[in-house]
Amino acid sequence: MTISKLAREIKESPTLKLNETAGKLRDRGEPVIHLGAGEPKSKVPIDAILSAASKLTTADIRYTPTEGISSLIKAIVRYTEANYGKIVSTKNVIVSNGAKHSIFNLMMTLVNPQDEVIILAPYWVSYPEIVKMVYGIPVVVSPDDSHFQPNIEDIEEAISSYTKAIIVNSPNNPSGIMYSSEFIAQIVELCEKRGIYLIMDDIYHKLIFDGKSIISPYKYAKDQTDSSKLIIVNGVSKMYAMTGFRIGWTVANTKVIEAMINVQAQNMSCPSVVMQEAAAGALNGIQSGVENLRLTLENSRNVMLNELHAFTGIRVTPPDGTFYCLPDFSAYSKDSIGLSKMLLEKALVVTVPGKEFGIEGHLRLSYCGTVKEIMEGIARIKWALDPESPNEIFIGDRKYRRDWK
């Protein structure tokens, strides 16, 4: 059997693989703690459930228009005006199977073979692979300090005649940092000046802490016409804890949206009508659940930061939002993959290697679990790594002894 060269070169998703590994360990009865997860524990909004149930009870479950159902598209138009201060048309919106699918369809729409897409490290693991899957070239720009925000000069230097787009994810997965308003203003100006698409992956933009506010890139755009190359990607997965519903959307100029509709029509016809109804219910319904989730995550972040500060040698930049932080563990090991494997084997704690996000020596830790899981998970990591910690620890009902250096 022959597998295509492209398929052979695409990396396995490390986060999905870790979810699978954690599930297998739990199935075996192992007391594993998953600090790599990207799913909140909160329940799906009741308005989403009722909307989906109402559609199901009609027993009339059919295809929808490729771009999505009218009620959801109108809800996204209202959401864009309310949260971005931008009035868009229903013709500026397409609904897809999650924000990941939105980005994939965008890359298929915009990128020719050998076109370059600039990706800011640390980056979400799927960005480089998606670019490769449409035969583009990912160009990574790394920060030069521990605050995870690249210099605009470095980004400009990375631009070439082949550059088609820049992807910006703020608040950022995996670091949790939020790029400053000055940085957003600069990158909007740079993309407009150079005629480059700016793709804002805003999937976490409602989950921000410390009184910070959503930064709308439209505020800094000079081009407010339907020729603008500013693109917004968002969805219901994170802010409504609806990861399993797989509904995301893209807001872009009509030319891009028309092309994306053709692309999407050929690769999946349309998103599930039941899931679309659920997403419309969430967007149109009571919004208190989003704030409750945000407050819960902010408290959990504070707990994780307090626990991490007990480590000697670990540096951590406090997250401004999301579910994640990205501490620097290089004082213990610069091999993040090896370190992550060791912590899973020795301490039964799942973490994600920083190398997968373009930042070696770091581990991504998630605080969207319970406070108990966060505290116990960090305690196990400290026991496994810190020679000054007690030599023995109980994991589940078994006593473990640290017999390594």
Image (cartoon, grey):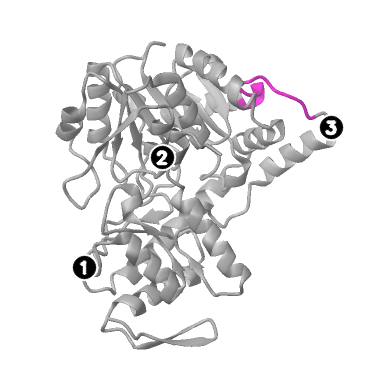
Q: Nearer the viewer, residue 120 or 185?
A: 120
Q: Nearer the viewer, residue 212 or 154?
A: 154
* Residue depicted at 65% across the width and 21% down the height: 70
Is 67 placed above or below 307 here? above
Comparing labels 3 and 1, the label whose residue is closer to the camera: 1
Please tell me how crowded label 3 is: few (under 14), some (14-19), or many (20+) other residues with Cα within 10 Å.
few
SS category of the residue bearing label 2 = helix
Tag 3–tag 2 contact (CB < 8 Å): no
Is 42 placed above or below 229 here? below
| Magenta region | 61-72
Q: Which residue is mark 3?
A: 58
Comparing labels 1 and 2, the label whose residue is closer to the camera: 2
Residue sitting farthest toward the front: 1
Q: Where the N terminus falls, by quadrant?
A: top right
Q: Position of residue 323 (x, y in %)?
A: 43, 53
Q: Which residue is mark 2?
A: 9
Q: Nearer the viewer, residue 199 or 332?
A: 332
* Residue depicted at 31% across the width and 82% down the height: 404
Measure how far apart labels 1 and 2 are at the Cα level.
32 Å
User: Does the magenta run of residues contain 166?
Assistant: no
Kindly report the secondary structure that dominates the magenta region of the rendered protein: loop
Q: Position of residue 230 (x, y in %)?
A: 37, 22
SS category of the residue bearing label 1 = loop
| Relative to 392, 91 lies left or right | right
User: Does the magenta run of residues contain 62?
Assistant: yes
Measure how far apart labels 3 and 1 are at the Cα level.
59 Å
Is 192 placed above or below 45 here? above
Q: Which residue is mark 1?
A: 331
